[in-house]
Amino acid sequence: MPHRVVDFFRSSNDSIHNIKASVQRRSNPSSRSASRERPTRHSSPASSVFEAAADHLQSQICTTPPVKMAEPPKEKQKDAHSHHRLSFPSLHLGGSKSSKEQPGNPYASLDWKIESPPAVMHGEPENSTGALVSGQLLLDVKEDDFEVENFDAKLEIHVIHKRPYTSHCHNCSNQTTELKTWTLLSEPTILSKRIHEFPFSVLLDGHLPASTNNPLIAIRYDFSAEVTPKIGPVIKLAKNIDVKRSVQVPELPHHSIRIFPPTNIAASVHFSQVMHPISTNTFNLRLDGIVKHNVDAKSVEYWKLKRLSWKLEENMVTVAPACEKHSPKDPETGLPTKKGLKRTDVRTIVQADMHSGWKSDYSPSGSIEMEIQCALPPTAMAACDLKSEDGTEVTHQLVVEMVVVQEYAPTAHPKHITPTGVARILRMHFGVVITERAGLGVSWDNEAPPIYQDVPPSPPAYTCDIPYESVDDLSLSRRSQDRRRRQREPTRARNRKRPTDGDTNWYNGF
């Protein structure tokens, strides 16, 4: 008997499969009938042990109640079947992105070249003369006898509202206004194999907004051109024109004085009202009236500066208009009415807190002086000041906050300072303008040659001193003088002495 147990544990994996098969045959009556029909095999001593173990296992299965296993959800079954799928990367070389892109025309290509300086509007929108943009469209024809049916180009101003009137509505989020169109070829034309140049130019009015991209709105100028050939797909060109605005920087910094009653503190600030997106600006601050002498009480009161914080805020206001589908209808006419929602946003571009770095003087005419560096790094993403006719406006302000604490000291012992427990917060706002640099360029009207009709003062007027009546008399007198001269010439010819044949002195004179 022990050798049978040893043979059972030393058996191969086939014994385990035999046990499972016997269990399934005993549990399934159909399998039992099938097993009865099969021819019998001569069992060995080891196989009898396997059958005894299988009978014992089957008895345990029959005595225990059947347990119903939880079926996996359908989604998991789908996932289990999905991972058996075979993927062939070679069959997906042309992805969805490449299928959306239209193939280019193999016979020609289109490009552009801007010849004018960068589009910069100089001055405020009320006084600006705009910006001039000029260039050439380059149509590179690669084969002879390339026929073009038409060639058009246009310039549009595209406004994208990031918080539209109705979310997930393309028409509420995007508004376009056509500024200029060009019809470069209106009739079918056969072009030779070379680069054909088509010039274009446009004057952008000074009241138009500059290009911007802020959390509320994005404004850009889209230039598009389209060539329709007779053979092949349409040739398209889409570009953006970056339009900027530059405000002149004053030569002297702005000076502002603020008084904070009921105290005698007066703040004097020198700062530059015009800043650039990537620059470092300096403003000087001086506090006067920080010392107060009480003659009757023989004491001195001081205002000490404990903390100074400054920040540059950006205020954005825009109106999100409604499209024709979402705008309310007029009850009388039934037509859509113009309606929009006001959107505002305030964000802090840069800020800093200072607990030291100023000079304090507590003499009878004491003061506190400091110099603060206000830097605008590229990471600040500051938007330039903007004001348009559709209600979009971007402004900036410099906010300065100071915490001052009052202290008391006797006149005889000024070093024995005692806090009074009184503190105040001094807050100041200063409007600043963030604008682009003008660079070396000037406005287009200053570069143009002068025109007599437009340049004041006008050219001097020319006057004629001779009256018009005497002109005819002068012409008649000239005719009479010519007649007299003609009459005198024949008489002179008759009176002239003719030479003889023997007179040789006459020839020698010539």
Image (cartoon, rainbow, N blue to C red):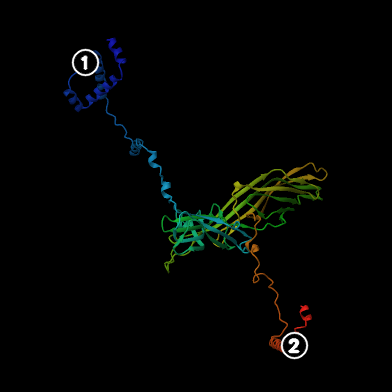
- Residue 340 left/right relative to 478: left
Question: Seen from this angle, which residue lies furthest front?
Answer: 502
- Residue 327 visible to an observer of this rendering: no
Camera-nearest residue between 111 and 39? 111
Q: SS class of the residue under badge 1? A: loop
| Quadrant that contains the N terminus | top left
Question: Seen from this angle, which residue lies furthest left?
Answer: 37
Return the x and y of residue 466 as percentages of the image width and height.
Answer: 72, 84
Return the x and y of residue 218 as percentages of the image width and height.
Answer: 53, 54
Return the x and y of residue 449 as percentages of the image width and height.
Answer: 65, 65
| Quadrant that contains the C terminus | bottom right
Which residue is labeled 2 in the image?
492
Return the x and y of residue 434 as percentages of the image width and height.
Answer: 63, 54
Sequence-first tag of 2 and 1: 1
- Residue 194 left/right relative to 296: left
In terms of image quadrants, where is residue 35?
A: top left
> Measuring 83% from the left and 44% from the top, which residue is drawn there?
412
- Residue 157 left/right relative to 100: right
Q: Disc 1 marks which amino acid? A: Ser
Camera-nearest residue between 388 and 315? 388
Q: SS class of the residue under badge 2? A: helix
Which residue is labeled 1 in the image?
43
**Quick check: marks 2 and 1 in contact, CB under 8 Å?**
no
- Residue 89 left/right relative to 309: left
- Residue 417 visible to an observer of this rendering: yes
Residue 142 vs 40, above or below: the answer is below
Circle 1 Cα neighbour tier, 10 Å, few/some/many (<14 / 14–19 / ≥20): few
Camera-nearest residue between 501 and 140? 501
> Measuring 72% from the left and 48% from the top, which residue is drawn there?
371
Question: Seen from this angle, which residue lies furthest right?
Answer: 412
In front: mark 2 or mark 1?
Answer: 2
> Measuring 25% from the left and 23% from the top, which residue is drawn there?
21
